[in-house]
Image: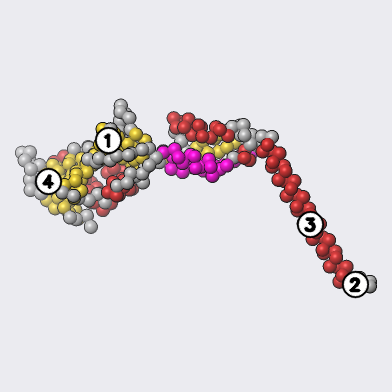
Amino acid sequence: MPMTLDDKSRLRKTAVTVSVAVMTACLAVSLAALVIIIVRTHGFAVRIVSIEGAERSDEAEIRLITDTWLGRSLLSVKKPLLVYKLKEVPWIRDAKIGLVLPSTLKVRVTPRLAVALLNSRTEYGYKMFLLDAEGVIISQFGGGRLADYPVITGLELNNLYAGEKVELAELNGLLKVLGWMKNDQAGLYEEIEEINFENAYGVIRYKMLLTRRNIPVRTLRLDRDFFIALGTVLQHRGGLENIRSMTCLSNMIFVESRGSSGSAEDGQQEVRTR
């Protein structure tokens, strides 16, 4: 039986489809073989590791992880694994990996930013730790260095290790506020020298020392509204050098001032803290 035009057309379409499929499969196999050859023969070998976002003094710690890829194929770099290892470094908050042909491994890290220095009593005596706004311990703080952060005292915490998070709700809440303040209220942040946790009959109170003014502040709260109100008091009240102390009760800040003879005057209501 002779083939009709429709049969011939279908046959041609089938032949074309088969040819395209065969060519695609051959191309895929060729590319896979090429990749395997490049990887196994160290083609596009890593010659340069570019690091961004780290201080020069911190690069050595990163290179202990990244330099293991030097001389190996750039195409063999396991980016998720490398990111995971970098984020195990306590002071690294996040990391991104880029591959730049023919031979550059590009690493960009986002460091954790310290907001406070914790001076805690532990089972091994008093130790100091740098904390970020998320409550993660960046590192233990050695002696002989000046601290440019508020110092948190009055706590007794054990099992504190770099890279782990401090599990204390009141402390973590304060650290978040300090992180906000460092970014948005830098002037007030720089005023705070020490924040002391006092636990009286199961109620946590806070005693704070404002360093430049040498003003003690007592409060039951350390939230954002309190610090906004405190900043308003310091900014707008005249004669700051005459302030003896401040106390926050409920939602009001009371200021105790020195009289002309140096004696303390009666407390005055200052700013409502919402």
The residue that appears at 82% across and 60% down in the rendered structure is 16
Over which residues does the magenta segment extend? 78-101
Q: Are marks 1 and 4 in contact (CB under 8 Å)?
A: no
Please name the residue that numbered disc 3 is placed on.
20
Spatial CA distance of label 1 from label 4 is 39 Å
Instruction: Name which residue type carries label 3.
Output: Val
Q: Earlier in the sequence, mark 2 or mark 4?
A: 2
Tell which residue pokes out farthest to the right in this image: 2
Mark 1 Cα-neighbour bin, 10 Å: few <14, some 14–19, many ≥20: few
* Mark 1: secondary structure: loop
Please name the residue that numbered disc 2 is placed on.
4
99 inside magenta stretch: yes
Determine which quarter of the picture holds residue 32: top right
Mark in front: 2 vs 4: 2
The residue that appears at 24% across and 49% down in the rendered structure is 222
Q: Earlier in the sequence, mark 3 or mark 1?
A: 3
Mark in front: 3 vs 4: 3
* Mark 3: secondary structure: helix
